[in-house]
Image (cartoon, helix red, strand yellow):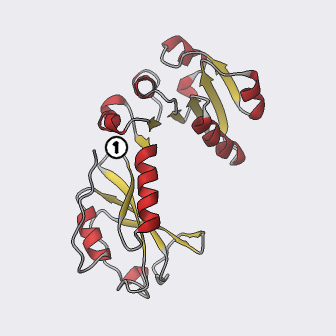
Amino acid sequence: MRVIIVGAGSVGMSIAQELLINEHEVLFIDRATTDERMSRLPRADWLVGDACEIATLQEAELQTGDVVVAATGDDKANLVVSLLAKTEFGIPRTVARVNNPKNEWMFDESWGVDVAVSTPRLMTALVEEAVSVGDLVRIFDFQQGSASMAGITLPPDNPNVGRRVGDIDFPEDTLLVGIIRDARPIGPSADDALEAQDELLFLTTTESEPRLEAMMRPGLPARHHSSE
């Protein structure tokens, strides 16, 4: 997979490092990179230029990419890059970093963004998850189709502990896609039984999330999940 990352700051560098470990092809576009930074990831390709300019993206042969990651610290730049990647170069998938939560509402398909990753929201979700075992926590939103990823850590008294995955009737448009148990990921099968302290990861929709929460937190009032 060829991934173009715009912005070689700490976020972009961390993403690239993981992608390179997994044998993907990475091209950085950054207008102010340094030789020292480039030397830290010699397996990546580098292009010095402004990714908000069509000429730079043409030089990068963006149309040959599979994913564009707009990871700069400037929300305006991330939106422009995502829009150009989609409308001018037909990139199949765009991922954009949201720096200011107040701008999150703009990061949708109208600006060419497939997945918006809000660092403040993600950190908040992780904090909530750490201190609120038993609460359903929205981790992030996919902009297409109103889909989202949510997680819950099962407390010992949750009525779903001990039940087989295949015996649980999850709400419509909701999939249990992963179980994290003892810090190891499990791809759930119908025969897997849920255990206390399992972290369950769901793909769901904003419409189905209240029903999922009611099922996973029976007897407790539903909480408001703001998308702002």
> Residue 110: x percent and y percent?
30, 31
Q: Residues within 10 Å of mark 1 (few under 14, many from 20)?
A: some
Outermost residue, top side? 55
Quadrant in the picture for residue 211: bottom left
Please state which of residues 180 and 22 is positioned toward the viewer in this rendering. Answer: 180
x then y, percent, for residue 17:
68, 42
**Along the line of sight, which residue is nearer the eye, 156 or 203?**
156
What residue is drawn where x is 45% and y is 36%? 96
Residue 200 on image: x %, y %: 45, 70
**41 relative position to 57: left or right:** right
Which residue does the image show at 38% across and 86% down from the upper left?
157
Say above or below: 122 vs 83.
below
**What kind of element bears circle 1?**
loop
Q: Residue at x 42, y 29 (%)?
A: 75
Answer above or below: position of 102 versus 85: below
| Location of the N terminus (image quadrant) | top right
Q: Give percent across and percent down for residue 55.
A: 53, 11
Say which of 189 and 70 sits in front. 70
Q: Can see residue 108?
A: no
Q: Which quadrant holds residue 202? A: bottom left
Q: Which residue is mark 1?
A: 143
Q: Is residue 190 visible?
A: yes
Say what amino acid the circle numbered 1 marks: Gln
